[in-house]
Image (cartoon, helix red, strand yellow):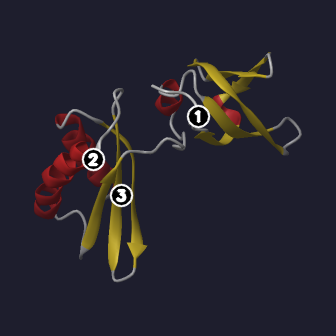
Amino acid sequence: MQRDLEALLEEQVRQAGFRLYEWSLKPGGRRRILRVSLFAVDGVGLDDCAVVSRRLGPVLDESDLIAGSYVLEVSSPGLDRELTRPWHFETALGEQLRLVRRGADGASETLEGTLLAAEGGMLRLEREGTEHAVPLAEVLKARVLPDFTRRR
C-alpha cells in the first residue's frame, strides 16, 4: 500500500508541475492525516498547494488506497526543511545547514555550515573558512537553517 500510495502521489504532484518532497500518513485523533509536501525551484505558494489538494482529493478517494477517513494537508517543506534524500541536498546548495553525522568513533557530531556541493555520495560543507567533506552515508539528520537577513 505504501509504495502504491507514494507512486500515486508522485504522479499527481508531477502532473501538477511539482516534485513530491515528502509525505506521511499518521494518526491524528479520529482520522489519519495525510501530509504532502511539494517542491519547486521557484518555490511553492498557497495557491499551488490548493491546486494540488483539489487534484489529489478525488484521485485518492477513487483509488481507495487509504482505508477510512483522513485529512489531506498539502504544503511546502518550509524554509527550515529537513533533508532526507540525496536530491534534497542538491536543492540546498549555497544554504546554511545543520547536520548531525556519525563520527568514526560511533559518536554523533553536529556541524553547521554552507553546503558547497552534494555529489557522488559526498557533501562539501564550508564552516568558518574550512571545507569539510562528509559522506552522505554518515548523515543521521540534516536541516536547512533559514537566513532571514538575506533577501531573495
Q: How far, Cα to Cα, is label 3 from label 1?
A: 25 Å
Q: How far, Cα to Cα, is label 2 from label 3?
A: 15 Å
Whether label 3 touches label 1, CB < 8 Å: no
Which x, y percent locates residue 39?
A: 36, 36
Point 54% across, 39% down: residue: 83
What's the residue type where badge 2 is placed? Answer: Leu
Give neighbour class at mark 1: few <14, some 14-19, many 20+ (Cα, 10 Å): few
Q: Secondary structure at mark 2?
A: helix
Point 22% across, 48% down: residue: 8
Which x, y percent locates residue 131?
A: 76, 17
What's the residue type where badge 3 is placed? Answer: Arg
Q: Secondary structure at mark 1?
A: loop
Kindly identify which residue carries mark 2.
46
Which x, y percent locates residue 31?
A: 32, 77
Tell which residue pokes out farthest to the right in this image: 105
Q: How far, Cα to Cα, is label 1 from label 2?
A: 21 Å
Q: In the drawing, does residue 32 fall left or right of residue 51?
A: right
Q: Along the polypeptide, which appears first: circle 2 or circle 3?
A: 3
What's the residue type where badge 1 is placed? Answer: Asp
Determine which of the numbered discs, if any, sits on residue 26 in the image.
none
Image quarter hosting the C terminus: top left
Point 66% across, 24% down: residue: 114
Kindly identify which residue carries mark 3.
35
Which x, y percent locates residue 134?
A: 72, 26
